[in-house]
Amino acid sequence: MSLLQHLDIGILRALNGLAGRHPSLDALMLLLTLVGTGGAIFIALAALLALRPQRRRAALHLLAAMAVSGAVEELLKALIMRPRPPLALPPGSLHLIHAVPASSALPSGHATVAFAAAAALWQRDRALGAAAGLLAVLISLSRVYLGVHYPSDVLAGALLGVAGAYAAGRWLDRYTLKRK
């Protein structure tokens, strides 16, 4: 096993080792995972932003970033087919307090969508982007804490999300009408 694999598993076990021992932390991590599922919180934020004409471009960027990143994430999952930690590590080596998703692990969909949203917002509004970035980090940590992703899965998802937000922003700025 390589040094990076040892590091990946070590971080996973350290974070997941807290699961089941701290009910309040378990509840918080389950809530963060729920909030991050499907990017629903960011879709709701885009809807709120779209209500204000001066924020519609940010809303469009947010949705485009999530769509682009999410599509690439699904394609990569289908191509890579990395098993989730509970299916790859010895039985009983993780503390599972959440159902193990049937999809493959790499990249993390939660991290991809959350970081796509945060990066898109950062490009349009730094304060909103910073808050979304903090939420993206917490959502990503919840996935490792719950034992359903390796840290490298969420790191790959975060990088993919940021790249998707950048690409969506470039496309929007180039091919859509700009406000004067």
Image: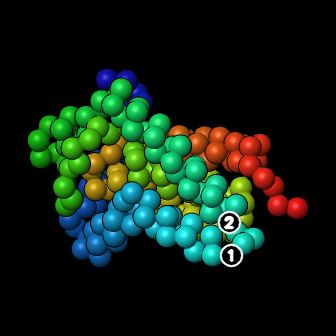
- The amino acid sitting under disc 1 is Arg
Outermost residue toward the left? Answer: 91
Left or right: 50, with 83 as reference point: right
Looking at the picture, how far across and down is residue 29, in whole percent? 34, 66
- Report the front residue among 69 and 133: 69
Left or right: 170, with 111 as reference point: right
Q: Residue at x 40, y 61 (%)?
A: 36
Left or right: 7, with 165 as reference point: left
- Report the front residue among 172 and 108: 172
Residue under circle 2? 56
Outermost residue toward the front? Answer: 177
Looking at the picture, how far across and down is residue 164, in whole percent? 58, 42
Looking at the picture, how far across and down is residue 172, in whole percent? 70, 48
Disc ID at residue 52: 1
Looking at the picture, how far across and down is residue 112, in whole percent? 47, 47
In which quadrant of the rendered view does residue 97 lie? bottom left
